[in-house]
């Protein structure tokens, strides 16, 4: 298993750009209450939005098209639900991989019951049009972009017509490629792999012979051309989103063309460089008119359900390359993205009462997948996370000192200049971990890049639950030695890395070199990760007990000018965090004691 299999390639981080915007919008001072949670929009509110948009011909067109596409996809969603009972699809195993029936390799029967009792639907809206969202083109203000999705700065209106700033995460859709059709019936991930290879053909209204191509794994997005790349994007009914199967040549042609100064050439779907290999990328390329057409531009449409069997005017198909390998056109990681973003919404809703977790506000939902996850907007991240060492973060501010920064940032840094202040700010995160573990889950991907500061309270919050699993998940994946308690202790070790980064005065530590991942406990240098939980039980050879000397060496005792009581409490916290099997209740209790050991600034 790769060393960082379960680690997100990029966490959702709010950098200096977002913080400066927050200041420019005159956020309320720390003493004011935070904005109230959003309420479901009323019919009156939606009417105001439509009236405002209809003030111009372009605005009226946007509103009309939004209604048209919403109605179109509503009928597609109903059709997909009906296909779960289709006998032909059941007989060949495809029914189980359609939306609303996707099996999740990370879900157990206990998780399924948990989801039934988790009332996340109170956050749900069915389209972006139901929200009073500004700017309407939400993609304009990008906070960050990474493997798990992009985060945008948006404003939403509450029931009192007041605008508040939020962050909206839009799950990232993978690129297109050709992949072998999975056939291992015992693979629990089989349905998720199959759904990436299913396509829905929808006739373009008013444009006979042309189709929109949707993939159920990524919701109501359609196959589109962007430059020479293929992507799944929001339907706007442009020529670059319209396709037709050319029965004579076998090509899948776009209505969009590639224009040159002297000519205009048709574009079609092409396997890059004719590589007949599993995972070969697919792009839009000039359609060859030779006879016969090259196989890397020839496709066969294999129907699984059609208007004849379902009476809906829609077709469910697989699109097969005519190259020798007979591989299927596939959205890369589509089902994985869908699964992880859906679980993240459920977890955000489940633990929404905890102050150490970013607060969920709304979820724009379509075809059983989150299209936009709207959360409270936070400030800087604690450390650099997966980014470079000089990433703008609080650890960098601590290293630089308060003299070179704005007053607001200097006040925050000052509050973290004592071990007691650090304990108070991180206690909500520790309480979140304790609750996750008591409920039978582990976070799996905690690091200083996805722990962010709330600018009004001075406390830290966790923003990313996309890698959260049941506690026993990794025992099933990598062996019984890494049991559920091992995963719990590993979460606390990663918390210890963040805690030590702060009490060291800003030292940037690598959680992957010190603790490792669930899949590997070997550092980038090839040596064992020194702070990883022991695989053996306490009392057996190899089970390290006690605070690592290098951890004590990191603590800035001189700079913090600790009183004896504060130093003793800090030692107790570290002892609890580096126990062979960490007790979350003890950690939270000792952090609380450390936070109470000093209320004012550094001791003289």
Image (tube, helix red, strand yellow):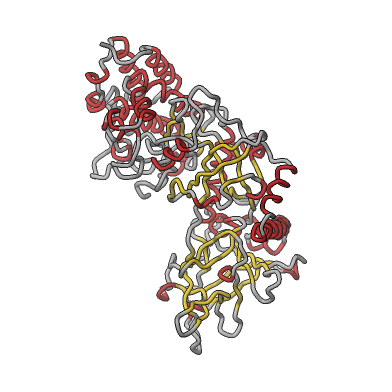
Image-based side of 295 in relation to 361, left or right: left
Q: Identify which residue is drawn at 71% across, 42% down.
A: 45
Q: Nearer the viewer, residue 156 or 587?
A: 156
Identify the image quadrant of the C terminus.
top left
**Quarter of the image where one finds residue 88:** bottom right
**Quarter of the image where one finds residue 343:** top right
Q: Tell me residue 383's x, y (percent).
A: 35, 36
Q: Identify which residue is drawn at 50% across, 82% down.
A: 264
Q: Nearer the viewer, residue 121 or 435?
A: 121
Q: Tell me residue 190's x, y (percent).
A: 54, 56
Q: Identify which residue is drawn at 42% across, 18% down.
A: 586
Q: Is residue 5 above or below residue 178?
A: above
Q: Is residue 85 visible?
A: no
Image-based side of 402 in relation to 268, left or right: left
Q: Tell me residue 426's x, y (percent).
A: 41, 25
Q: Nearer the viewer, residue 16 or 474?
A: 16
Q: Is residue 191 above or below residue 600?
A: below
Q: Nearer the viewer, residue 40 or 6?
A: 40
Q: Is residue 505 above or below residue 126?
A: above
Q: Tell me residue 79's x, y (percent).
A: 72, 59
Image-based side of 56 in relation to 147, left or right: right
Q: Identify which residue is drawn at 56% across, 84% down.
A: 249
Q: Is residue 415 visible?
A: yes
Q: Is residue 419 above or below residue 565?
A: below
Image-based side of 526 in relation to 270, left or right: left
Looking at this view, name the residue that lies furthest to the right: 311
**Quarter of the image where one finds residue 303:** bottom right
């Amino acid at each position: 298993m790769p060393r960082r299999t379960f680690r997100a390639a990029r966490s959702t981080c709010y950098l200096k750009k977002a913080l400066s915007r927050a200041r420019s919008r005159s956020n309320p001072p720390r003493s004011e209450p935070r904005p109230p949670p959003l309420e479901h929009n009323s019919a009156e509110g939606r009417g105001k939005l439509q009236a405002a948009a209809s003030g111009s011909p372009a605005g009226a067109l946007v509103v009309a098209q939004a209604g048209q596409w919403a109605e179109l996809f509503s009928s597609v969603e109903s059709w997909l639900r009906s296909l779960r009972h289709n006998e032909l699809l059941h007989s060949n195993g495809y029914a189980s991989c359609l939306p609303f029936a996707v099996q999740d390799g990370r879900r157990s029967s206990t998780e399924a019951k948990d989801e039934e009792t988790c009332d996340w639907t109170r956050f749900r809206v069915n389209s972006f049009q139901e929200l009073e969202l500004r700017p309407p083109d939400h993609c304009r203000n990008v906070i960050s972009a990474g493997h798990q999705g992009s985060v945008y700065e948006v404003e939403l209106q509450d029931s009192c017509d007041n605008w508040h700033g939020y962050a909206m995460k839009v799950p990232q859709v993978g690129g297109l490629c050709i992949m072998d059709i999975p056939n291992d019936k015992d693979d629990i991930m089989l349905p998720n792999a199959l759904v990436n290879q299913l396509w829905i053909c929808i006739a373009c209204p008013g444009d006979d012979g042309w189709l929109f191509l949707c993939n159920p794994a990524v919701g109501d997005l359609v196959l589109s051309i962007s430059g020479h790349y293929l992507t799944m994007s929001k339907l706007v009914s442009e020529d670059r989103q319209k396709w037709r199967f050319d029965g004579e040549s076998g090509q899948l042609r776009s209505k969009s063309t590639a224009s040159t100064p002297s000519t205009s050439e048709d574009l079609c779907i092409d396997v890059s460089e004719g590589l007949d290999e599993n995972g070969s990328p697919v792009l839009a390329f000039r359609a060859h008119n030779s006879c016969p057409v090259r196989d890397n531009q020839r496709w066969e449409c294999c129907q699984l359900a059609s208007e004849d069997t379902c009476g809906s005017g829609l077709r469910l198909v697989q699109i097969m390359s005519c190259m020798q390998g007979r591989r299927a056109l596939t959205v890369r990681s589509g089902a994985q993205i869908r699964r992880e973003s859906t679980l993240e919404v459920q977890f955000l809703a489940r633990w929404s009462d905890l102050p150490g977790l970013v607060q969920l506000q709304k979820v724009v939902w379509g075809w059983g997948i989150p299209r936009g996850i709207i959360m409270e907007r936070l400030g800087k991240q604690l450390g650099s996370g997966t980014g470079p060492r000089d990433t703008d973060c609080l650890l960098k501010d601590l290293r630089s000192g308060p003299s070179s920064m704005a007053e607001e940032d200097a006040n925050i840094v000052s509050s973290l200049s004592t071990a007691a202040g650090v304990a108070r700010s991180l206690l909500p995160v520790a309480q979140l971990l304790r609750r996750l573990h008591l409920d039978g889950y582990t976070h799996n991907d905690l690091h200083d890049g996805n722990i962010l500061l709330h600018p009004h309270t001075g406390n830290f919050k966790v923003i990313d639950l996309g890698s959260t699993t049941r506690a026993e998940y990794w025992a099933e994946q990598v062996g019984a030695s890494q049991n559920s308690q091992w995963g719990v202790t590993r979460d606390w070790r990663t918390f210890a890395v963040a805690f030590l980064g702060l009490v060291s005065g800003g030292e940037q530590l690598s959680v992957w070199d010190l603790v490792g991942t669930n899949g590997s406990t070997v550092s980038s240098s090839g040596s064992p990760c020194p702070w990883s939980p022991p695989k053996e039980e306490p009392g057996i050879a190899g089970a390290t007990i006690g605070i690592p000397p290098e951890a004590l060496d990191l603590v800035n005792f001189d700079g913090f000018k600790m009183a004896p009581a504060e130093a003793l409490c800090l030692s107790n916290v570290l002892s609890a965090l580096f126990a062979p099997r960490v007790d979350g209740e003890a950690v939270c209790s000792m952090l609380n004691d450390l936070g109470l050991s000093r209320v004012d600034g550094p001791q003289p």
